Image (cartoon, rainbow, N blue to C red):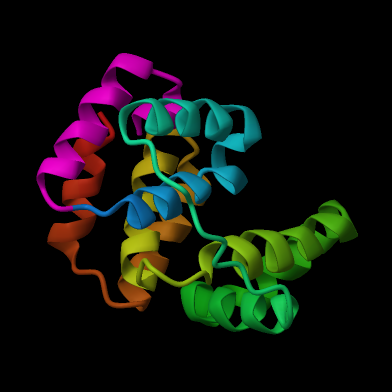
Amino acid sequence: MAAARGREPSLKRAIRAAVRAGVTPAQLDEALLQLIPFSGYARTINAFAVLQELLPHVPHSRGVRSGLRRRGEALCRRIYGPVYRRMIDRMRRFHPDLATWILEDGYGKVLSRPVLSTVERELLVVAVLATLDVPAQLKSHELGARRVGADAGQIAAMLRLSR
């Protein structure tokens, strides 16, 4: 949440706490990469600068370029469940490229990556969307987190963190 807000002192505290709790550099990398579709490249780049300052390490690319659309659609269907088709059609009406980018980039490149589980990723999405104050997307991802296995207590904890 600190990275999404661009709050460097808070981000430093959060990274230090995560490391003390046993979070690995690879997990931190994945959490920060996940910011791209939600808060953009600028916030993500700044967050990585802080991470590298505090925890210098050599990141490893875990991105798999083949099958992005297939993986993205499969994961998006899991998260959106019965409203998937209606949501993606709406995005296509907004702009055809928006729907494609959501599926290929957001879900295919970012959210379906290894290291973090789908539940962990959705819980992070809930926290970031709550932080960014985008209620419609937050509601969709709260439901999505439940669909992929998060419980109400986990979701509530992420919402409390975002305040």
- Asked whether residue 79 is drawn in magenta, I would say no
Q: Nearer the viewer, residue 132 or 7?
A: 7
The residue lying furthest to the right in this view is: 96
Q: Nearer the viewer, residue 22 or 36?
A: 22
Where residue 121 sits, quadrant-wise, is bottom left
Q: x, y percentage for residue 14?
A: 23, 32
Q: Residue at x 54, y 78 (%)?
A: 75
The image shows a total of numbered marks equal to 0
Q: Residue at x 39, y 71 (%)?
A: 118
Q: Classify the position of the C terminus by image quarter.
A: top left
Q: Is residue 25 left or right of residue 136?
A: left
Q: Is residue 17 left or right of residue 66?
A: left
Q: x, y percentage for residue 157?
A: 16, 48
* Residue range corresponding to the magenta coloring: 1-22
- Asked whether residue 16 is drawn in magenta, I would say yes
Q: Nearer the viewer, residue 71 or 56?
A: 56
Q: x, y percentage for residue 149?
A: 28, 77
Q: x, y percentage for residue 31?
A: 40, 50
Q: Nearer the viewer, residue 13 or 5?
A: 13
In the rendered view, tell whether residue 71 sits above or below residue 35: below
Where residue 39 sits, quadrant-wise, is top right
